[in-house]
Amino acid sequence: MKHLRSISELGTDGVARILKLTESMAEINTRSVPKVPALRGKTVVSLFFEDSTRTRLSFETAAKRLSAETMNFSVSISSVNKGESLRDTIETITDMGVDAFVVRHKSVGVPWQISQWTNASIVNAGDGAHQHPTQALVDCFTVREALGKQDLTGLNLTIVGDIKHSRVARSNIQAFHMLGAHITLVAPPTLLPLNIDHWPVKVSNDLDAVLGSTDVLYMLRLQSERMAQGLVPSLREYSTRYGLDERRVAALRSSALVMHPGPMNRGVEMLIDPSDIPNSLIHRQVTNGVSVRMAVLFDLLSAEELS
């Protein structure tokens, strides 16, 4: 694998390979010194044009635990503010000698564009409302770990919220579908994509109607800018219809898992503290993020066995 820009590019076999490799990385992270020399001599650049905490720090931690050198690109103090083009930025950093770019950008397709300007590997850490493949891998691994099985055939995954603008939703739909899960999307019509008829999903506008059949409830963040666009009448109405509260948690199966990619809006889509939710995997998603991203970087940059 040269790049990881989308789940479809990775394919079913690739998803299985990364999830298997993640098991080894998770074991490394339980050691008293969670570090191996697998990527010694390699350099990984974090190129984030959008704000991020979890994904950026997760990738940086993953690279360091594999003994890679890391470089952090800060847009606010870079030559981008002097008018330097994206291509010039990529070519300049490439000339310094790097092996991989971890890229987040507000525009769809930027990771593919960047791959034309460098011989380094590209990892998509989120491009617009298009793809976030490593988050989907994190979520698949976390669900399999919680269930204690690799086969997700027949699993009922319910994704709730702003599907229209969510790169997490798009990547998760592809990844979980590859693993055999059944997927239901729950959102107001204004927050659903126009071409959803072609997706391998069912659609509902009624969260309460699907809770009883849900195995994994995946809550998405309601992005505040959607209010300014008039896509949601009010936060209060949205929370009433699509927020997760104590009543809805009680309506879930006792075995149902609850997830959120973060950052969460407390009091909007999350009306209950995650620590009060039985079978919440929200903190586990963060922990597993490091292991999954270690697996991705290792798969891209190393041809040697772990030691």
Image (tube, rainbow, N blue to C red):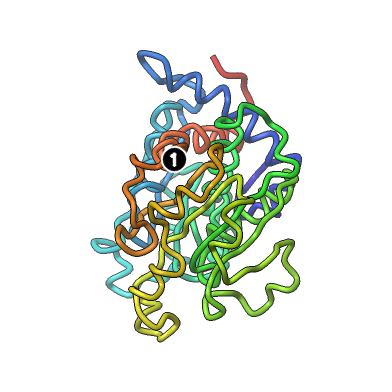
Where does the C terminus fall, quadrant-wise?
top right
Q: Nearer the viewer, residue 299 or 231?
A: 231
Q: Residue furthest left?
A: 77
Which residue occupies 47% across, 37% down? Answer: 279
What amino acid is at disc 1?
Answer: Ser
Total labels drawn? 1
User: Which quadrant would residue 180 be assigned to in this image?
Assistant: top right
Q: Residue at x 33, y 68 (%)?
A: 80
**Residue 224 in the image: x percent, y percent?**
34, 72
On screen, residue 256 above or below 231: above
Q: Nearer the viewer, residue 87 or 3?
A: 3
State whether residue 53 is above or below residue 294. below
Quarter placement of the N terminus: top right
Residue 129, image x and y in percent? 52, 68
Which residue is disc 1 drawn over? 280
Say which of 144 and 210 sits in front: 210
Residue under the image location 48 percent in, 66 percent down: 87
Q: Left or right? Give the position of 174 relative to 158.
A: right
- Residue 169 screen position, x and y as percent: 56, 59
- 181 to the left or right of 168: right
Q: Position of residue 197 (x, y in %)?
A: 73, 73
Question: Residue at coordinates 63% horizontally, 35% vertically from top-left?
Answer: 18
Q: Is residue 133 left or right of residue 60?
A: right
What is the quadrant of residue 111 in the picture?
bottom right
The quadrant in which residue 271 appears is bottom left
Secondary structure, mark 1, is: loop
Front-lying residue, 20 or 107: 20
Q: Residues within 10 Å of mark 1 (few under 14, many from 20)?
A: many
